[in-house]
Image (spheres, rainbow, N blue to C red):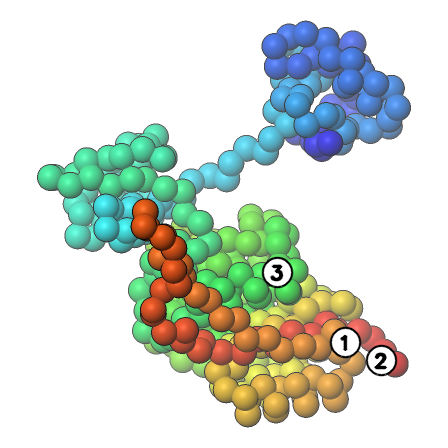
Amino acid sequence: MREVRELLDAVQEVDADCAEDHEGRLDEAVKKELDNHPGAPPAVLAPSGIQHIRVRGLRGVSRTSLPSPAILEAVVLLDRRGRKTLVPLAGDTVQAPGLGVFATKTLRESLGRRVKVGGASVIVLRPSARDLAETIARRAQVLTDKDLAAILFAADIGPGAHVVEAGSGSGALSVVLASAVGREGRVVSYDVREEFLEMARSNAARAGLAARIEFRTGDVRLGINEVDLDAVVLDIPDPWAAVQAAWDALRPCGHLACFSPNMEQVKETVAAIRARPFVDVYTIELIERHMEVRDVGVRPSFAPLGHTGYLTFARKVLEGF
């Protein structure tokens, strides 16, 4: 089953007699669902095969069951060697470092296609969270893809979430968080070093996500101004010193995520968490190994399985056991 969302708030009804599939034939399955759910609008359920539902009062207008893609604010240019270049789509033309000048309109209209520049060619991609993390300019060490993905999943960070990050660094986590929370969400990123904040702001602008992130100079160990947060992510040398501030800022059942490069940091952090009303406390280390796939066979890559760090997670409660 698929949820079909009404896109116009002013429309309060769906006419079963006007429920048609994308080929114009009356679909009995849709009528049945509407008959069984007379109060369904503005959101009704329809079988997954149905593409459109016509709405009463909008003759000849159909609404797709799939959400419209977000406004494209940047693209990634991929060359034959797998190198990626993040290009913000601002103005009539854009400069891609090492590649040349492109018409913004051409890039917008060429998603998934090859575009020639000089004697070379690139494929135009819509940026993924992985692309954003891989293509930022770096001054500080950044979290890897596997750690970023784990933080989003374990801390339940998604569309509409309000998140505070401590330790902006180069902005890799900032842009991934901003991508995850969407236009309705909010990310506030703190760092005590203005030079890192400047780089993080620049990277957020290149990714087309600057409007979703507020960068602030500040020390979260002394307190967090925001309240009722869905998640707090600590990527600082002494996360245990900010655990109380995180608890104060989180909403009930909100998530805390801490990144620590070594075990001693983990020990201190977990001790601070367990001394306060948190539950579901656990720490993980993620090991990623690439596979080399060739016609003659498949084997693990000989690249070293480098340690990145440990992730500690917890959830705020108002009272413990």
Please name the residue shown 46% across and 54% down the image: 129
Rendered image quadrant of residue 47: top right
Comparing 119 with 159, the one in front is 119
- Can residue 320 be spotted in the picture? yes
Front residue of 234 and 264: 264
Q: Dot 3 lies on which element?
A: helix
Residue at image mark 1 = 279
Q: Are marks 2 and 1 in contact (CB under 8 Å)?
A: yes
Disc 2 is placed on an element classified as loop
Three-letter code, disc 3? Phe
Marker disc for residue 209: none
Q: For residue 239, which quarter of the picture? A: bottom right
Mark 1, Cα crowd under 10 Å, few <14 / some 14-19 / many 20+, is some
Nearer to us of marks 3 and 2 is: 3
Question: Mark 1: which secondary structure?
Answer: strand
Mark 3 and mark 2 lie on one chain; the one further toward the N terminus is: 3
Q: Which mark is residue 153?
A: 3
Residue labelled with disc 2: 320
Q: Classify 53 as above or below 319.
A: above
Q: Is residue 126 left or right of residue 50?
A: left
* Mark 3 crowd level (few <14, some 14–19, many ≥20, 10 Å Cα): few
Q: Which residue is drawn at the image coordinates 32% and 47% (left, top)? A: 295
